[in-house]
Every structure is written in C-alpha cells, then in structure tokens.
Image (cartoon, helix red, strand yellow):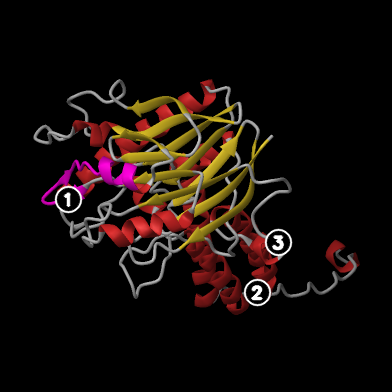
Amino acid sequence: MSLTENRAPEADAEPETPRRRWCWGTRLVVGATAFWAAFLLAHLILSGRVWWWSLIEMVPPFALLVPSALLALAAIRALRGIRWRLWIVHIALFAIAYPIAGINLSALVGGAGAEGETDLTVFTWNADYWHYRWDDADEFYDYLLAQDADVYLLTEYLTRTDRVERIDDEAALREHFPDYEIAIASEMVTLSRHPIVETKALDTEALIDAGDPGAPPADDPWREYWTTKILRTDLDVDGQIVSMYNLHLSVPVPTGEASPLKADFYEYVRAQYQRRTSQFTVLNEDLDANPNPVFVGGDFNSTILSAGIASMRERLVCPDPDSVMPVSWPAIRFPFPKWWRLDWVCVGGGLAVTEYSLVSGEGLSDHDAQTVGLDIR
C-alpha cells in the first residue's frame, strides 16, 4: 500500500465566491463623491491664499449643500455593500459644507438679537451711485429719513460716467440731517446723532506698491477711491466711546460685460484680490489695536465662503439677520432673485446686537440695507 493511499481524503474545498464588479452607477457615485470631497478640501486650503480661488468664493454658498444631498440620493444606485459607507461620507461632507452654506435655521425658532435694551440704532447701506442712478434726490433722502437711525453708514457716495467720479452732496446732507454730525472719506459717509470725537480713514497705501497689480490705475485722478475703502468714526455715546467702521470693500470679480475668455478678466480678479487682501489686513490690524467697543458694517463684497469673512468671524461676533437664508444682492436686478449675502455687520468689545434685519432698498439700490439695534454693555 502506498503512502498516498493511507492519507485521509481532503475535504472538498468550497468554491470561492467571485467578487462582484462595480456597476457603472457605483463607479460614477464613488468618483463624484471623491471629487466633491477634494473640492471641499481644496476650498479649506486655498481660500485666501491664491487669487484665482476668488472666483469660487463667489458661488452662491447655499449651492454647497446640493452635491452632498444629490450624491446621497444617487448612492441608492450603488452596491449594497458600499452604500452605507457612501452615506457616512456624504453626511460628513454635508457637515463640513453646512457652516459655510449661509443657512440660518435659528431664524425658525427666534431670529437675531440678544436680550438687552437698544441704546443705538444703525442703518448701513450701499446706496448704488447715491441718487444719481435714478436722478431722484427727493425720493432718495425721503427713504433715508424714514429709517430714523441714530447712525447711518452709507457707501457709494459717487457717480459714474466712463469711470467712478467724486460728488459733493454735503449741502443736501446737512439740509436733510441738521441734527447729525457728518464724516466723509472717499466714497463713505457716516452720519451720527452722537458727537464724532475722531475720524480715521484706513488706507492701503503702505501695502500696495506702484508696480503691483492692485495699484490704482495711473490715469485715474481719484486715487482715494482705490486706496480708501474703510472709514472709522469714534462716537461719544453718553460717555462711552464706540468705534463705527463704515466700509465698502473692492469687488472680487467683474460684474459687467467682461468675458472670462479674455486675459483682462483674470488680470482684474488678480488686482482685486490684492486690494481686498490689503483692505482686510488694515481693518483687522486696526480692530486688534482698538480698545473700544466696535461695530463693523457695510458691503464687504464677500460671501461667507471668503477668507476675509472667516477672519472677521474669528475676531468678532457676526450675527445672522432674522431670515433662514440671508441674501442681500442679486447678480442682475429684478426680476432675478437675490442669491448672495454680501452685506454684513460684526460687533465686539462690549456691543451686543438686540435686533438685526435686512430691509429692501425699495428699488433705489441693488443692495438691501441692514438695520441693527445695539446694546452697549
């Protein structure tokens, strides 16, 4: 008998179950999920660091929630074995996108504002070429007077022909607001019922050299328009000094007929990136050195996606108004919807917001205005 004949017969090996190959739907969902995750990661890394990401920052922020929601639904088509893994990833990506999507669900249960008495009311508004766009000064001033605010922070105190130009409407301002003190710098106007004890225009002259992309155009006589976008006024409010920052920061991307197929489109974006970065720099440096309670308000020309708004939210409290999806500006005027919130207010150093609303410019501007109540603590 041979040795082989003495061996016990081996148990029949079970046939291996062949691994199921991914179908086209699974591959598509996995690939799209990977791309979306990479995009969000790129935003966290590149925002505020490279000029060309300014284009991405102007996407309507709420759109960031759409890919995760659609991909979660599409995952139903994926293989059962990886479907739940995809859903976990989509939940994580949704959680990353939600804080920068500009959604304010707290408005459903209360809205903006804190407990306390309103000591100061502020109205801040981009007036859209003052009253010169519609050539109706009476309607313009009637609208302003109807707000009955203690402080007005107004911008676009200018007009435009082939370029922006200075205006002089100070006599009309003093006629309509005889009980207010007035401060004017560049295109910013601040009106205050309380005494203005100090005025300071924050400029970017020291940060942008003549040969830089963000330098003012050499042929523009109004250099201040390009270098001064922030006006600080210190007010004496019943013995307490409060610093009000009135601003209109540079537009990050062309909003006219410039074509993204041409080089000058991207040259503009690069120049505006340097201007905006410098404007946020001088603002943040002044805020960091300011011991007073501070209010910052105006047209930031920035969505919640921008690094500039992120820097403000690290330093100050930037509340949401009393709406679920706060928006203040449309790319094109009526009948197109507003999809962007470019107008913000932030407070710090002992100020609390008691009420905050976005209000219509009533056709006088393409921007909504902001009305704010403040408690000085």
Q: Residue at x 62, y 53 (%)?
A: 355
User: Looking at this view, is 49 or 311 the one in front?
Assistant: 311
Q: Residue at x 25, y 44 (%)?
A: 169
Bin the neighbour count of mark 1 within 10 Å (Cα to Cα): few under 14, some 14-19, many 20 and up: few
Element class at badge 3? loop
According to the picture, the residue beneath numbered tag 2 turns out to be 18
Residue 178, picture quadrant: top left
The residue segment tinted magenta is 159-175
How many marks overall? Answer: 3
Extreme residue in the left direction: 219
Depth check, mark 3 against mark 2: the one in front is 3
Label 1, label 3: how many angstroms apart (C-alpha)? 42 Å
x, y percentage for residue 288?
Answer: 53, 24
According to the picture, the residue beneath numbered tag 3 turns out to be 110
User: Looking at this view, is 27 or 62 the one in front?
Assistant: 62
Amino acid bearing label 1: Arg
Q: Is residue 145 left or right of residue 252?
A: right
x, y percentage for residue 324?
Answer: 59, 65
x, y percentage for residue 83?
Answer: 66, 71
Label 3, label 2: how many angstroms apart (C-alpha)? 57 Å
* Relative vertical location of residue 69 with respect to residue 265 in this rendering, above or below: below
